[in-house]
Amino acid sequence: MADIFISYKREDQARVKPLVDALEADGLSVWWDSHLEGGSAWRRRIETELAQARCVLVVWSEASVGPHGDFVQDEAATAKALGRYLPVRVDPVEAPLGFRQTHIIGLEGWTGRRREAPYQRVLAAARGMSQGAEPCSPSPPPPALATSPLARPRLAVLSFAAPEDSDDQSAFGEALAEDLIAGLSRSRLIAVTPRQSSLTYQAQGRSAPQVCADLGVDYVVQGRVRRLGPRVRVSVDLVSGADDRSVWSARHERSVEDQFELLDEIARAIVGAIEPAVLEHEQEAMVRRDSRQPGHWELFVKGRRLFWRSTYADIREAQSLLNQALELEPDDSQTLSLLSHCHMFYVWADVTADLQGEIGEAHALAVRAVARDPADAFAHFSLGTTLEMLGRVAEARAEFVRALELNPFQAAAAGMMGRLAAFEGDSATAIDWSDRAIAMSPNDPHLFLWHWNKAVAAFAAADFPLAVERALETVARAPFLFANHFMLAASYAAAGRIEEARRAFAAGRRIKARYTPEALRICFPFRRPDDAARFAQALRTAGWDG
């Protein structure tokens, strides 16, 4: 058992070595993986050394705080839970969220000499921790079961079961579980247990509530991998520990050709489905709960549920709940972002006398969200959406690209890329991005919007029969939104099916009696003048008097 386990990114190996040499010269035993070779046992070796070390020295750098620093961040989370976390910094960076409460010792200017003050601070802290002291005030271990409705839900992914005599299927199952942990960890709405805890857990014969209690989580993801000839079948189940209920389950079967491509495809499908399923279950639980003093998470979840019901009264109530949530956590980027969408709703629904004022308020909230958490993909998506409403398309596209860099599973950003392309008349690109969004998150509340993109793309391509077909799909998915009926009405009219166009417009008008030309320009922002004129004329043919 080593005194010190060093967690670092491989890119920083040359900078970490002088620190290792100095600590060993001062009589401390150090374990780091500089000579560890790959193979089936290397992860187990790391997990064992991490668990046994008296002190875990985490090296924060530009590489380890970035989107590819998952291993370091997972090791740091485990160290905090164990009370052995000692952070140092070799670049002028801020630690990721969740690691900023503990003082970080700065080594940015250290030359490698043992007598220099920055190193002496590290040495004193490491010696203290290796002797049982707590100089860095590490966080206490998590509670036995995190089922409080006032906090974001916690989730663990277990290794996928495989036949005992099949090493390749076992390896595939472990790799899939790791990819799910990495993907789900990008979410700001779910707290995911680090792989060191969940992938070494032996769940055989234990119920989901027992597993959740052992790991301190609310939900567990478990599954099985089985190869049948040239095909692989993956079954997966998301279970709530509180009521031992299967919240969501699925089965994926694919042919085995390129295993890496297969792994990516299945991981994307599962990650995209799990967050909406967890949030839907949380929303159901919060509806049944009547708290006198609701916490931030309860207020946020109830507000989110009302937002997606998408009526004026629901949005007003959602806005009230989200403002209460923001009073409790003023810097929460997710709350700021969802409030931004409330203001955008008033513009989309044309229920405000000051469309530009509401867009401005939405934009200001989204800017605050990004400033509070620059690594929040949903915040960048929200900012991009406000920029699109302002007509700043190039900036909007850059925000959506950034959202997808931060979270490749951010389906809403992919859907907005499809929307931009649809209104620009680039139908092929619009279809590609919209289909990607649908595949990423088939249970997402945004789903009808991505089908709507495809109807717009067909209209812009002057394929009006196809526009009708796609608009019908959109209305079937969200018949409560007048814009879907208006899209169908314009498509029917452009296709020469006037009576059907008038019926579709009448259905939309029953939901929305008045729709102004300014709202039409903002919400149907065709970039080519001919497309905009064609759409407006088709809507007039259907009965619009704008």
Image: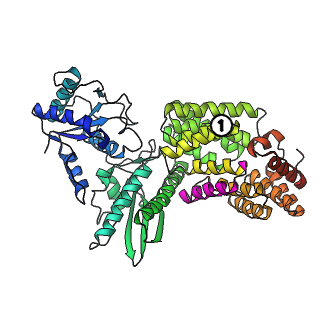
Residue type at mark 1 is Leu
Magenta-colored stretch includes residue 433: yes
State the residue at coordinates (50%, 31%): 372
Give how far across and how far down residue 216 sits, in percent. Answer: 34, 49
Q: Is residue 188 above or below residue 102?
A: below
Give how far across and how far down residue 509 sits, in percent. Answer: 83, 51
Residue 335 appears in which quarter of the rendering? top right
Q: Is residue 431 above or below residue 169?
A: above
Q: Is residue 263 left or right of residue 491?
A: left
Q: Is residue 91 left or right of residue 333?
A: left
Magenta-colored stretch includes residue 392: no
Looking at the figure, which quarter contains the C terminus?
top right
Pointer 1 residue: 387
Span colored in magenta: 424-443
**Residue 316 in view of the camera:** no
Q: Main secondary structure of the magenta part?
A: helix
In the picture as drawn, the residue positioned furthest to the left comes out as 27
Residue 8 appears in which quarter of the rendering? top left
Give how far across and how far down residue 340 sits, in percent. Answer: 62, 37
Give how far across and how far down residue 322 sits, in percent. Answer: 58, 37
